[in-house]
Image (cartoon, grey):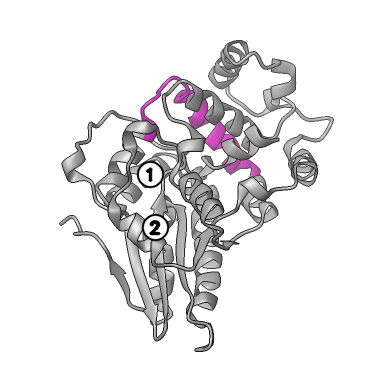
Amino acid sequence: MKPIINHFKFISMFFLILSTLGHTKENDQAFLWKVQNRHITVYLAGSIHALNESHYPLSQAYIDAYNNSQNLVVELNVNALNPIYSQALVQSKMWLPRNQSLESHLSKDALTSLKTFSIKNQTEYTRLIQMRPWMVIEQLTGYQLKQTSLKAELGVDQYFLQLAKKDNKPILELETLEQQISAIAHSPFESQLEALEVSLEQLEDKEYLNKMIHFWRSADPQGLYDFVYQDVISHPKLAPMMNNLLDKRNKTMSDVITLYLNQPISNRNSYFVIVGALHFSGPNSIQTHLKNKGYFVQPMFTPIN
């Protein structure tokens, strides 16, 4: 079960237009904000879900924010999932109806790419074409990740999950597994198909995470969003999935964070919230929702002009 869950962390990255861009250590900033409401402080940290050893140590600003917080908050604590329940949930949403096949929906070029992928990944083609598009995208993303030096176990969220376990610090969650999987599995079928077509076109490009990491290390949420959204402009059918994966989830996450900010004065907790960096980018970001609720959200980096 764990490989499926690890792959799921990348669902909001699959439609990126890929290009190579180097990064230098001296340009690193923390992708980090602070929100305060009287006696409560909430730190908002953007995560990249797969890194390698060269990206450590993290900026000291992350470590200070974590040390100043009584609670770690993540999207979902994948290390605490019940594998039996998780497997059953995924299985319930991953298959097409018995009388359907992706061969009836994908273009000829996409099917050729899917056959090539099945050989390279040693996955039965007849099994792939019976899957819903979102699950095939998961398979493709896992394959792409394996072609790089990046590892999910070295992602920023995993780093702090392990640290919190060692420190015996409470770990809170913004979502449930069902909410996360439903965000993509319940996206409109046509949007899923478009996303799969794009993913198959980009199958052999291995640099998308490097581009993501560049924007994260530069603390450039607008650059990150523009980079992601250009593919939605090129493929408008992706928009409903973008809405499900980011916009709707951002609102839900911000509502939970608002509950933390309104703890009673007897509860002087602070919270270190770490979620995927894309959730802190764009016009419907978590910060935007909090600002619309009347909170002052302070960036803890120098914004790029």
Q: Which residue is mark 2?
A: 45
Q: Is residue 44 above or below residue 208?
A: below
Amino acid carrying mark 2 in the image: Ala
Q: In the image, which residues are magenta?
A: 188-209
Q: Is residue 102 above or below residue 302?
A: above
Q: Position of residue 221 (x, y in %)?
A: 31, 54
Residue 271: in magenta span: no
Residue name at image x 58 percent, y 32 percent: 137
Q: Position of residue 295 (x, y in %)?
A: 38, 79
Residue, far front: 167
Q: Quadrant of the N terminus?
A: top right
Residue, far right: 98
Q: Earlier in the sequence, mark 2 or mark 1?
A: 2
Q: Position of residue 268 (x, y in %)?
A: 48, 81
| SS under mark 2 | strand
Q: Is residue 193 visible?
A: yes
Question: Image quarter for residue 196?
Answer: top right
Q: Quadrant of the C terminus?
A: bottom left
**In the picture provided, is 257 more to the left or to the right than 179?**
left
| SS under mark 1 | helix
